[in-house]
Amino acid sequence: MYPDLEPYDHGLLDVGDGNRVYWEVCGNPDGKPALVVHGGPGSGAGAWWRRYFDPSKYKVVLVDQRNCGRSTPDAAEPDVDLSTNTTAHLIADFEQLRRQLGISRWLILGASWGATLGLAYAEQHPEAISEVVLFSVTNTTRREVDWITREMGRIFPEEWARFRDGVPEGQRDGNLPLAYSGLLHDPDPEVRDRAARNWCDWEDTHVRTHPGWRPDSRYDDPVFRLRLARLVTHYWGHAAWLEEDVLVREAGKLAEIPGVLIHGRLDISSPADVAWRMAQAWPGAELHLVEQEGHGAGGADTKELILEALDRFALRP
């Protein structure tokens, strides 16, 4: 990967409804524009994202999506209002920032939830997108949410039973993300913290399907735990406010946009058929299924494929 970069510009974008979205730009001011779409929802755009880009060729824009990272207000605040944090709001934020920065088109690099958001953005605004590189591909459909919050219990039955039992008995057969969301907004801080721990324990479990897995140290931070759990349950509980399978149905809108999809074969919590179906529906998209690797970009082969795609696209006008 490339050396770490320091931003040469940054700010807080006032997107309305009391929200201010953090953004930063690094690399070559005259380089090819690229937008980083982070995962979670709620992870924030960490500095490690910058290292995928050749700093001499790319103008890299990183954004902390609403209510996470350095954006305000923080989803971890006790009385935060998430009603104006939806997929449509995040897409509008990207477009507002693109216009403010004077960018006509930019490449998208996204992962996990960022793949869902990146695809939704590209399908709504294809004229603004030059290329797309996604890894750990998701669409955040109700089918996928049900898989990750229920059917993955077949892989980790004991851990899933603890996860399910973290909500009141009368809610255990319903929408588990919404049930957890209610607990995460409870007036009692002990109820909130216990729910955040239970949720993040399951988050750390369902990705534990590949060699070399290590626990995510970010979950040791109670503020991060609450922020992430609140945002993930908010989005998963509503299937990202997207019509079921709409991203696959409307993939034809991406026909003129080169795309690279990278997915670990051992990413059981986000099964490879999601990436495969998208590649089948997206004319000209490349699909790389990486053996012996799971969710995220921890594996050497996944990193190599990301770097290769970005280096190749850097040469496109």
Image (spheres, rainbow, N blue to C red):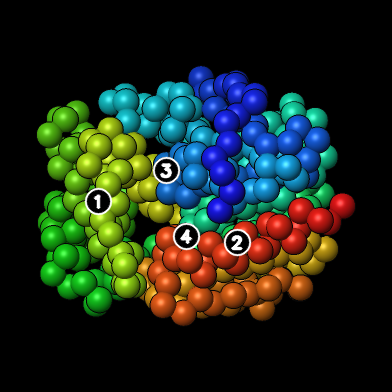
Mark linked to residue 306: 2
Q: Is residue 137 visible?
A: no
Q: Mark 4, mark 3: which one is toward the viewer?
A: 4
What residue does disc 1 label? 199
| Callout 2 touching callout 3 (CB < 8 Å) | no
Mark 1 surroundings: few (<14), some (14-19) or many (≥20) residues within 10 A: many
Mark 4 vs 3, N-terminal side: 3
Q: CA distance from mark 3 to mark 1?
A: 14 Å
Q: CA distance from mark 4 to mark 1?
A: 22 Å
Q: Residue 45 placed where, x, y %?
A: 50, 40
| Callout 2 touching callout 4 (CB < 8 Å) | yes
Mark linked to residue 297: 4
Mark 3 vs 1, N-terminal side: 3
Q: Residue at image x 16%, y 65%?
A: 159
Amino acid type of the residue tagged 1 in the rendering: Trp
What residue does disc 3 label? 43
Q: Mark 3, mark 1: which one is toward the viewer?
A: 3
Q: CA distance from mark 4 to mark 3?
A: 14 Å
Q: Is residue 180 visible?
A: yes
